[in-house]
Image: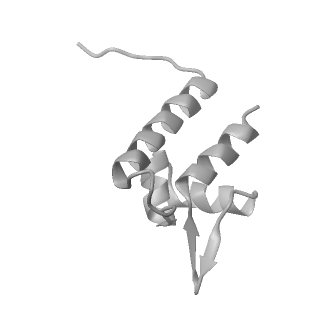
């Protein structure tokens, strides 16, 4: 039997935010410097496509350009996303 769960966009954002926060917490202890991840990793953490990460960056999501590659601090990206949803 298959169950269908219906969530609002706000509930989905909250679930994603919690999942990313937990994943980041597992990656590095609190006393280490902030983690920078590439767009592919951030897309996996947020369960979105790389194209969505690109669109969010263009829309103002915090990012750091290192050479030819954009890097992201997941915690900053989550705060930015939370701020957009309010």
Q: Is residue 71 left or right of residue 62?
A: left
Residue farthest bottom in this picture? 67
24 is higher (above) or lower (below) than 17: below
Q: Residue 71, located in which quarter of the rendered image?
A: bottom right
Residue at 63% over, 26% down? 10
Q: How many marks?
A: 0
Q: Position of residue 39 (x, y in %)?
A: 51, 65
Q: Is residue 82 left or right of residue 21?
A: right
19 is higher (above) or lower (below) than 76: above
Q: Position of residue 31 (x, y in %)?
A: 45, 56
Residue at 48% over, 62% down? 35
Q: Is residue 49 left or right of residue 79?
A: left
Residue at 65% over, 44% down? 79
Residue at 72% over, 34% down? 85
Who is closer to the viewer here, 30 or 44? 30
Q: Residue 68, located in which quarter of the rendered image?
A: bottom right
Who is closer to the viewer here, 50 or 22? 22
Q: Quadrant of the C terminus?
A: top right
Q: Position of residue 34 (x, y in %)?
A: 51, 61
Q: Quadrant of the N terminus?
A: top left
Q: Which color scheme does this rendered protein use?
A: one colour
Who is closer to the viewer here, 24 or 6? 24
Who is closer to the viewer here, 78 or 11? 78
73 is higher (above) or lower (below) than 21: below
Residue farthest left in this picture? 1
């Amino acid at each position: 039997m298959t169950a269908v769960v219906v969530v609002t966009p706000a509930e989905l954002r909250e679930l994603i935010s919690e999942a990313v926060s937990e994943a980041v917490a597992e990656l590095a202890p609190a006393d280490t410097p902030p983690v920078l991840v590439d767009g592919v990793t951030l897309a996996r953490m947020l369960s979105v496509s790389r194209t969505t990460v690109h669109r969010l960056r263009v829309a103002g999501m915090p990012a750091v350009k290192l050479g030819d590659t954009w890097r992201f601090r997941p915690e900053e990206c989550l705060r930015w996303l939370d701020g957009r949803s309010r």
